[in-house]
Image (cartoon, rainbow, N blue to C red):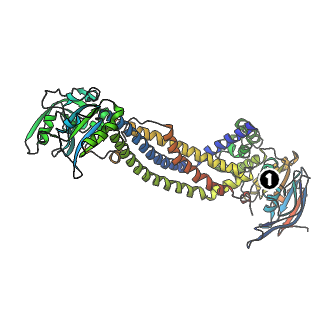
Amino acid sequence: MLIELSGVSKIYNQGKANEVKALADIDLEVEQGSMVCLKGPSGSGKSTLLAIIGCIFPPTSGRAAIAGRQLARLPDRFLTLHRRETIGFIFQRFNILPELTVLDNITLPLLPLGVPPRERRQRAEELMERFAISHRAQFPAGQISGGELQRVAIARALINSQPIILADEPTAHLDTVLSQEFMEIMQQLKTTGKTIVIASHDPLAFEHPAIDRIVIIKDGSIHVP
Amino acid sequence: MAQRNLEKQLNILDYALSSLWRRRLKSLSLLLVFAAVIFLLASFQMVTQALTDKARQVLVYTPEITLQKMSVGRQEAIPLAYREQLAGIFGIRRVVPRIWGYYFDEVRLANYTVMGMELGEMPEGARLDTTLSGGAMPGTDERGRVVIGQSIKKALALEGRTTFSLFRPDLSLTSFEVSGEFSPDTDIMTNDLIVMGLAEARDLFAIPAGLVTDLCVYVANPTEIETIAKKISATLPSVRVLTRPQIQKTYQVVFGWRSGFGSICLLTALAAFVILAWDKASGLSPEERREIAILKVLGWETSDILAVRFWESVLVSGLACLAGMTAAYIHVVYFAAALFRPVLMGWSVLRPELHLAPRIEVGNILLILAFTVLPYLAATVIPAWRSATVPADSALGG
């Protein structure tokens, strides 16, 4: 299993007046090369679960192993290092820096890895070609269309050849055509062996035929219908 | 591994550069204000250094010991007869009487310094001939001839004429002929100076025969100045004895005090700037918070974000330092420190047009760096720590 969560819970501001229980007793296993959709309304805990899988923070309790590493034992710095190597993120609204060029946005994850400029450009060019955005390489990201922006975000998530792709509400602000296009790209990535976890409450996402499993999250717990 | 780390730092530096470029208006305004503060500080430092050097260079021509008679704490004319009492002190090479005073030109509203001496009596090496840019010092028997400084030449608007007149105390006129002019290199001392024979000065100020304003003592061995000064003090207790090193020190103290005063004022401006920089660095706009959160999710460590801030600050302060110091050098060399002349050289109505050559010393550069760049780095990088700890999950949705 590439992702293994067992009895995972997350409590924000534990022991304080503003304590919030975001996740409780989550058990989840995701095989390599599969595509899972975390479905649930806003505030249900999808993003928190995605953050734990994405090694942004460890769970408050329980066991979380991502790509063979136990998160609970990893200090913050190693969580970051593990995230760099393992996880590619696609954010809601894509979180592209609008003043940077498309090329610079795609290569952002490579800068702290010490990848030299030539290699960065080479890797980005391969991805831009794959997603048909090469002609936009030197455009500021703020000046390209929504569809192109989506492909820039996907290219950025793949730039370091990470095995796991996490997408947080990727179709929330896209029209139907772009949402379909996004899911088709995810399907292609799945065929290349990538493990994909999408958090979404958009039917276009969770009803897509490429989705292997839907995990329903409700009030911080996995809901079994 | 070392190669990877070097590449990483280069990448982060590259990102810092692009970050500065993206916020170019903000970065440029910050850089300009910082460069202006450094320019003012560096100008003060350079002009003080240059003035001190210039004074030291010119004071070579002052007598080794100057004697002035004091009465009730004030200077008064000194009798020429004192020379005889000095004759017995071993080591004195020559005693030259001098009339030194100020002449206020009511027509041109300018103050001139007048020095009357028997120039021929001055010993070799102490003569003022070497400081002339044209003409010659008046000979012993040449009456009514004078040598003037550059500002006097302008103030009198001679324009080809060689004669001018000054009023005696009884308002009768006395005429002078210009026989030479002092070199602009010695402006700091000679700019407002008129040098004439002792008899002409006595006539101009109506000083009675047998009296002068001071006696200039030249010694045989310059290392014996202090010893001879002590002997003179013992022989003539009512006389104030000024040695050349004391005068040099006075100049240094005067310039140092003025520079120090100016620097304190400027350091206040610097402190205000640093507080502003601190305030700027500790507060984050929503866009900056978002950017940091995105970078952290993408695998940037807190230390990487801090490194970006550090490089940004190094670039801004380095460029500001370079621009500020270059501007200060140009200001001092090509504009003769026009901004600070009234502060640093306020003793004369006729202010010298100095040609200053700042001496660049590593120590001075380090001092300016220590007072400007280091506080700026501290003010931007320390609060950036708080900014860099923006949680990565804030880039994710709810």
In the rendered structure, the answer to whether residue B153 lies left or right of residue B354 reads left
Residue at left offset 34%, top offset 48%? B343
Q: Position of residue B274 (x, y in %)?
A: 53, 54
Residue B82 lies, with reference to residue A69, above or below; the image says: above
| Residue where numbered disc 1 is placed | A79
The answer to whether any part of residue B346 appears in the image is yes
Q: Amino acid at mark 1?
A: Leu
Residue B176, by quadrant, is top left
Residue at left offset 28%, top offset 42%? B234
Give SS at disc 1: helix
Residue at left offset 68%, top offset 44%? A104
Chain designation of label 1:
A
> Of all residues shown, which one is farthest toward the bottom?
A17
Residue A58 lies, with reference to residue A185, above or below; the image says: below
Which of the pair B9/B182 is nearer the observer?
A: B182
In the rendered structure, the answer to whether residue B360 lies left or right of residue A56 reads left
Q: Position of residue B310 (x, y in %)?
A: 62, 48
Which of the pair A148/B163 is nearer the observer?
A: B163
Q: Position of residue B337 (x, y in %)?
A: 37, 41
Which of the pair A205/A54 is nearer the observer?
A: A54
